[in-house]
Image (cartoon, helix red, strand yellow):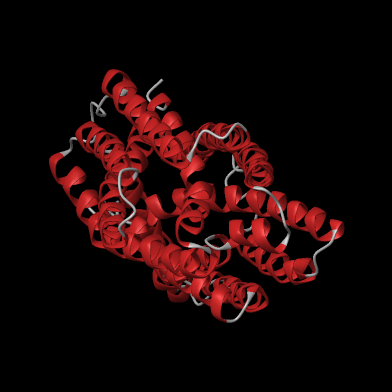
Amino acid sequence: MWRIGFFFHEMGFGLLSIFLPLYLVSIYGETHGLYYVGIITGVALFAAIPAAFLWGYLCDKTRHYKRFILLAFLAVSILLSLFALTTDVALLILIYALVAIFHAAHEAPKNVLISELYSHQDWEKNFAFYEGFTEVGTLIGLVLGFFASFYGLGLENTLFLVAGLNFVAFVLSAVFVKDPPMIFERSLVSMEKRVGFASNGIFLASRMIDGKGLNERLKTENVAAFCCALALFSLATNILFTPLPIFVSNNLGMPYAIVFAIFILNSGGGIVGYVFAGRKTEKPGGGWRVSGILLARSMLTLLLIAALVKSTFSVFLTVAVLILMGLLAAVFTVRVESLFMELIPPGRAGLINVLMGLGAAVGSLVGPFVAESMGFLQVFVIAGVIFLGAFISFLLF
């Protein structure tokens, strides 16, 4: 039951993720609106980078996780209400930056809750369940966005709806979220990895002393390559997805309600992906290869080039690519979250949000600017190449 608040939070942010670029373009026009999409989201995500590390450090330092989750949901609810009351660009940038800073406060505690409430062998399954459960919330949020657009709820009222969903998340989390009674699972995993590495080293040394040949070598994970792959994945994803609602709306000629409907299918693909992730990762070493997922994301992004010609085929191609991308992103998220909690020691739980936030911030700035100044062909090519770079980086890991 502790996840129920997160469900409503993701419902609100699922709606906001597609509504925000459409909202800004509606207010400022297509040309200025795209630039403001990049500036507002980029500045916000850059502001969230140090905040993510700070929140992760503080929650592990104090060992109080619930208070940071409550702070995030309540602050976001208040700030989004203020966001709906102004169209001044400077104020919107400031308010949305604060939204991103406080939003980051719930990410590290969420990862810690999963890591400490469940044993190591169940991490991937529970990460998959959490992400799949909250992805249903995202999908419902997109459905709400569809009906809000279809029935003409209005721009400001839609923002108040997002704020209200976050307030519901605050209330439910206050009731159901509890801090873990004991904090030791991540320390045990770290200890197991060190003992396993030392044991393997002793085994190899004994074979050398006995004059026996070695058919294996002692090695550890390349954490730097892993971190680089995460940042590149986030960079490419945001270069592609930040202006993508505008591509669907303007280039494909779809009304806002249909834009939401198309991204509902993307979210549905994510739910299927989380189901697969939960099943495939029950066996150690089994499941989907992260490197293969990254390569597939690159190929799918480049395939969107064929959708640049406005036609019925372009719409169906875009929908198919988004469904597959949602599925692949879900499996990727589950696998890397579990790997990250194994590799990073306590006290640095927010580092994954820093890495992903860095890529997201740059991508959110670059994507809309490239789309406006150069066109969506360059957006698809650049994002596809960066996904390929993430694939190569993960191979090095």
Q: Residue at x 32, y 44 (%)?
A: 186
Instruction: Name above or below for residue 220 compared with residue 268.
Output: below
Q: Nearer the viewer, residue 357 or 92?
A: 92
Q: Is residue 287 visible?
A: no
Instruction: Name above or below for residue 188 compared with residue 222.
Output: above
- Left of 314 or right of it: where is 231? left
Quarter of the image holding residue 85?
top left
Quarter of the image holding residue 224?
bottom left
- Residue 96, percent across and down? 31, 53
Q: Residue at x 60, y 78 (%)?
A: 382
- Residue 357, percent across and down? 37, 61
Q: Is residue 78 visible?
A: yes
Q: Residue at x 42, y 24 (%)?
A: 4
Instruction: Name above or below for residue 220 compared with residue 142.
Output: below
- Residue 395, percent across and down? 57, 72
- Residue 265, percent across and down? 69, 42
